[in-house]
Amino acid sequence: MTESALRLQLSNSQIYQGLKYQVLSIELIKSDCLIEPQDLVNLELPEGIDTTGGVVISGRAPIWLYAYLTHELHPTAWVACYDPRLGAVVVATHSRLVRIAQVIAVNLLNERSPSSQEKIDKNLCPALMVVGPPDSGKSVFSHALFQNLLSENPNIYLQRAHWDGEGNYTLELGAEADTEALKACNHGTLTERFFPYHAQAILQLRQQKSLVIVDVGGMVQPEKLPILEACTHYLIVSSQPKAVDAWHEFCRIRGNLMPVAVVLSSLSEVEMVHKLLPYIEITSGPWIRGQMRSVPKVVLKQVKSLLTC
């Protein structure tokens, strides 16, 4: 029997500032949390949708699934997509009560099951900033960390706070893909509002997640201070041992963040623990796109401990 790939769940009707809506939650239920386009075939919306109100789509899923569900929900008064950093963003409407691009500040924590709710601290969750010099494997490492944690806790979020065009999509493509060309197409530039925007997004995520991993660019820059203020911990990934002290000074002394680990990245196949206290220091590698690698257990255990802080 083929393993089911996803489940759609519909909440009861809710009211927010006079707006009636239901939440359509997407749950990826295969062990690897992957779905394929073929999974759209025979996919049906749950019964009980109130077409006189709106529907907020929520959950970790590909863009094409969101597009399909938005199309299928056309008979409803309005449709919004939930972004935990912003709220519910209206993307389709037949109602005069809402407008396209309106952000409805609903808090979907109230829609989660009691078992999921118990796992979320009432206070802000930790935010782990992954830092280090360029070409050290930070993005590959942070993605591997995210994937390793996600298998046990779906309430982890990876925030990419840099403008180089790299993201999960480039790291999940095959080795034959021209990722440099894709990055060039999506490359941005630093503006005055870039880091304050991401800092605010991190704070929003910390209200709703169990852990936020933040991948920032490879330069020590004063412009990143808003990110420091939004985070609680840091982890250095560096191919240059001499560059580590500068990141300690920036994150621990200037940002008052707690160190978790220093990963001295290597192009060789290696895993060597140098110390465990007051933070982990380990040589590990390689962290290269296209070469799948698990995060060292000692580092993974330490990061998991943040979930109970």
Image (cartoon, helix red, strand yellow):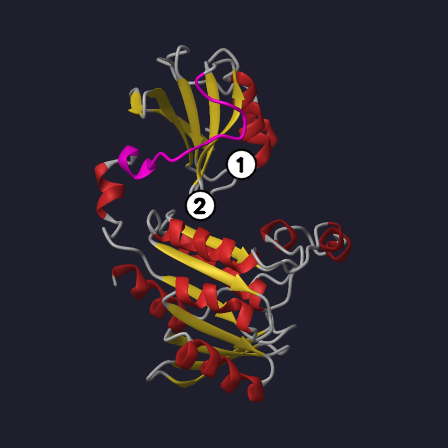
Question: Within 10 angstroms of label 2, few (less than 14), some, or many (20 or more) residues?
Answer: some
**Residue assigned mark 2:** 85
Question: Within 10 angstroms of label 1, few (less than 14), some, or many (20 or more) residues?
Answer: some
- Residue at 30% x, 59% y is 307
- Circles 2 and 1, Cβ within 8 Å, touching? The answer is no
Task: Please give left or right for residue 235 compared with residue 238 in the image.
Answer: left
In the displayed structure, would residue 26 be above or below residue 281?
above
At label 2, the amino acid type is: Arg
Q: Position of residue 108 (x, y in %)?
A: 33, 36
**Residue 282 seen by the camera:** no
Q: Position of residue 233 (x, y in %)?
A: 38, 69
Report the front residue among 271 and 143: 143
Task: Please give left or right for residue 185 compared with residue 49 in the image.
Answer: right
- Residue at 64% x, 60% y is 190
Magenta highlight: main SS: loop
Report the front residue among 267 and 206: 206
Q: How many marks?
A: 2
Q: Position of residue 61 (x, y in %)?
A: 51, 37
Q: Is residue 103 magenta?
A: yes
Task: Please give left or right for residue 152 compared with residue 80 in the image.
Answer: left
Q: Which residues are magenta?
A: 97-111
The residue positioned farthest toward the front in the image shown? 192
**Residue assigned mark 1:** 35
In the displayed structure, would residue 217 be above or below residue 168?
below
Residue 159 disc label: none
Q: Position of residue 160 (x, y in %)?
A: 54, 56
At label 1, the amino acid type is: Ile
**Residue 75 seen by the camera:** yes
Give the quadrant of the C terminus.
bottom left
**Helix, strand or loop at mark 2:** loop
First in sequence, mark 2 or 1: give its number: 1
